[in-house]
Image (tube, helix red, strand yellow):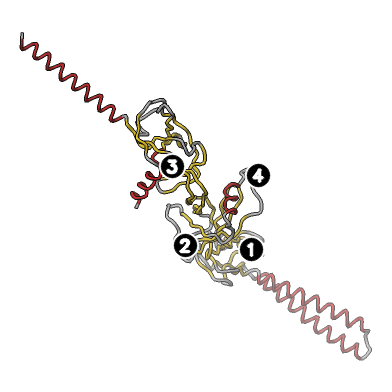
Amino acid sequence: MKRIVFSTSLLALLFAASCKSTKEEKEEVSKYIATSPVKMDTSFIKEYVSQIRSVRNIEIRAQEKGFLQNIYVDEGQFVKAGQLLFRIMPKFYEAEVLKAQAETKSAEIELANSTSLADKNIVSKNEQALAQAKLDQAKAEMALAKLHLQFTEIRAPFDGTIDRLPKKLGSLIDEGELLTSLSDNSDMFAYFNVSEPEYLEYKANGKGTGYKVGLLLANNKPLKYSGVVETIESEFDNETGNIAFRAKFPNPDRLLKHGETGKVLMTIPVHQALIIPQKATYEIQDKKFVFVIDKNNVVKSKNIAITGELVDLYVVASGLEEGDKILLEGVQKVKDDDKITFDFEKPEEVIHNLRLKAE
């Protein structure tokens, strides 16, 4: 009988200890760390999707009709200004030049005869003038024939890179038909759109043309050369509310090509920006949320808008106020309307510690 009583007492003691341990563990797990947003002057790098274009990109088209007799270049080849690219079969135009030369020679002889006779008063001065006009017309026709012959040779108007060659040797070419494109990639333009508020901030900070920017390529690697903002368009797009900027980047390695995409990296200064740690947020369907702690220590999820990103920090555009208490750690462990206990850390200390870790 004593043994049974002893066993019962031992079980009760173990159960009480277990309950106490579970309660302490639960209390320990339920204690979180909170902080607040803080306002500070800062700057962040913003990415703008951009279209990359050559400083000069033109279509090379035939100026005369005929068979494509020679192709002197290949696709992707770098060519110099004045270099011969194509030749349209010139036989017909060579014959036209010879005919014009013969007519010019004939007109010169006729003018010489008329001049001689006019000097002897055998024919009138009008006959001499008519012969002169005939010679002038023959010379004009010869110049035109030479021009047509010259157009059978297509040369590069500037240094650049040849694009695709859609026509092959022997193809019948019509006047104006596309033969290739030529791109001057020595420097490149990057076009990107800036919203009206960002444009106003840009101008308010005294920035204009000549402002340095970076370029992030499609492989998420930055271009090693900085660019400068060269122009800002004169009008906003009524549909998007954006205005177009154009930045110019050096391209000595010929890495950039016409038609590429990238992201222009612009440093945006912000006065009294509202800053929160990134780890205080969570994401649902591309939207950012934080847990705000009310006066009763109950957490409520709140959607926020992010305007910029720093190392381990977000710049908040809307959704929070400076005095709000937000959950810093344990974001994945709570849900709406949970009542919690927490220790509060000053936002300046939180940011300082984050920066120390980043270093």
Q: Nearer the viewer, residue 359 or 78?
A: 359
Q: Amino acid at mark 2?
A: Tyr
Which of disc 4 and disc 2 is earlier in sequence? 2
Image mark for residue 62: 1
Where disc 4 sits, the SS reads: loop
Residue, disc 4? 238
Residue, disc 2? 225
Q: Nearer the viewer, residue 148 or 206?
A: 206
Quadrant housing residue 131: bottom right
In the image, residue 104 sits, relative to residue 48, either above or below, namely: below
Query: Along the horizontal axis of the image, is 227 left or right of 121?
Result: left
In the image, residue 243 sits, relative to residue 33, either above or below, namely: below
Q: Amino acid at mark 3?
A: Ile
In this rendering, the label closer to the viewer, 1 or 2: 2
Q: Amino acid at mark 1?
A: Ala
Residue, disc 3? 276
Q: CA distance from mark 4 to mark 3?
A: 34 Å
Q: CA distance from mark 3 to mark 2?
A: 32 Å
Quadrant housing residue 26: top left
Q: CA distance from mark 2 to mark 4?
A: 33 Å
Which of disc 1 and disc 3 is earlier in sequence? 1
Q: Residues within 10 Å of mark 1 (few under 14, many from 20)?
A: many
Q: Position of residue 243 (x, y in %)?
A: 61, 50
Q: Residues within 10 Å of mark 3 (few under 14, many from 20)?
A: many
Query: Along the horizontal axis of the image, is 220 left or right of 245?
Result: left
Where disc 3 sits, the SS reads: strand
Which of disc 1 and disc 4 is earlier in sequence? 1
In this rendering, the label closer to the viewer, 3 or 1: 3
